[in-house]
Image: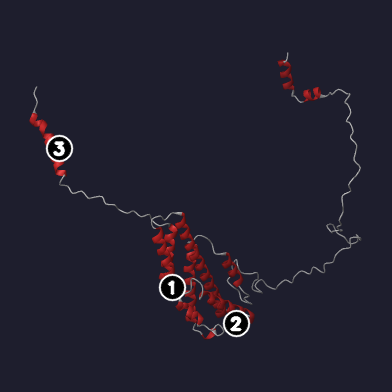
Amino acid sequence: MKWNRARCLYPVIGAIFLVGLSLYIPVGELGNKDYQTSAPKAYEDLWNSIEELEQHDVVEEEYIEDIKEKIDLLDQQNSEDWFSHTSLEAIDSLKTSHEHNAAKLEQSLRKAEHALQSLDHAAAQLSQEAKQQLMSEFGEALENMSKGAMQLNEDLLEQLKGLDMRELTGVDKEKLQAMRERMRASAEQLKKQRDEGIGPEPKEMADEESNSQGDQGDCGGKGGISRGPGHVPGVLGDEIPPLDTGDFKGIDPKSLDGMTPGDLLGTRDTEHEIEEKVAPRLDGGEVNSQSSGGDRVWKNSLMPGEQRALKQFFK
């Protein structure tokens, strides 16, 4: 038996060759990369909603630029620590303010569109008082849309201001229809701002909507949970007159004539009668009789089988 030295040197030579070859293989240097945390969902939703408003040209460009500046300021201040308490509170505050402004503008748009539709389609059936109320609502809505943080697009606002609500019959019907469709489309875009937001419509906006539905005269309206009470007269036939309940008269507490169960006889103020004499202490006395009867209760409370078991046990 002897060593084959040449054969043993092959693995050693191969290992040295591979190690030497690895010196010529380029290896990339690991640099110091800055990893940034992605922004919260509320921040991304707010940015997307602003871009959507800008794309559909719903509001004034000044509002878009102003809120974009605020978003950029949030990005610069909180990009390294998005999920801190201060950062999240600032994002939620800006988002809530934007949703509230969108809800107010949407409400004014819908009020103006409703008044314009009623005056255009049912002007002949409306009373003069109802027409005045609708024109007043339309003017109030235009005033709200032209002031505040979020204002309506200037082009559409000028078209609405140029309408003479007293002489809508002379306005081109196609122009009015196109204007109303644009108002509805803008209102739907503003509604998306609230639907994707944190909370529901503000309470004062809901109250304003419920109060904006005026008398429609003899014509039917669109209805809704915030509309009414009242319906179009004559839909269900002749109106039933109200029930005559007669005159309500009080009863005489001293006389029981003509009284029915449940009638109030009268009320009066009374005082408690206090016994001023103190009762003396009395002894209870002694019990002279021996107690009995427990054995009967004991026997009667057991079933026959239980009695036999006890007798068998105590034998």
Q: Amino acid at mark 2?
A: Ala
Which residue in the protein does label 1 denote?
62
Mark whose residue sits in front, 1 or 3: 1
Closer to us: 85 or 106 = 85
Q: Earlier in the sequence, mark 3 or mark 2?
A: 3
Q: Residue 199 vs residue 54: left or right?
A: right
Image position of 155 with respect to 308: above or below: below
Q: Helix or strand or loop: what does disc 2 sit on?
A: helix
Which residue in the protein does label 3 denote?
15
Mark whose residue sits in front, 1 or 2: 1
Point out residue 201 in the picture as x, y percentages from the top left corner: 54, 64
Which residue in the protein does label 2 denote?
124
Q: Amino acid at mark 1?
A: Glu
Q: Earlier in the sequence, mark 1 or mark 3?
A: 3
State the residue lying farthest toward the top. Answer: 315
Q: Amino acid at mark 3?
A: Ala
Image position of 254 with respect to 162: above or below: above
Rendered image: mark on residue 224: none
User: In percent of the image, x 51 and y 71: which residue is there?
Assistant: 105
The span from disc 1 to disc 2 (Cα, nearest Å) is 41 Å
Quarter-of-image position of residue 220: bottom right
Q: Residue 246 vs residue 152: left or right?
A: right
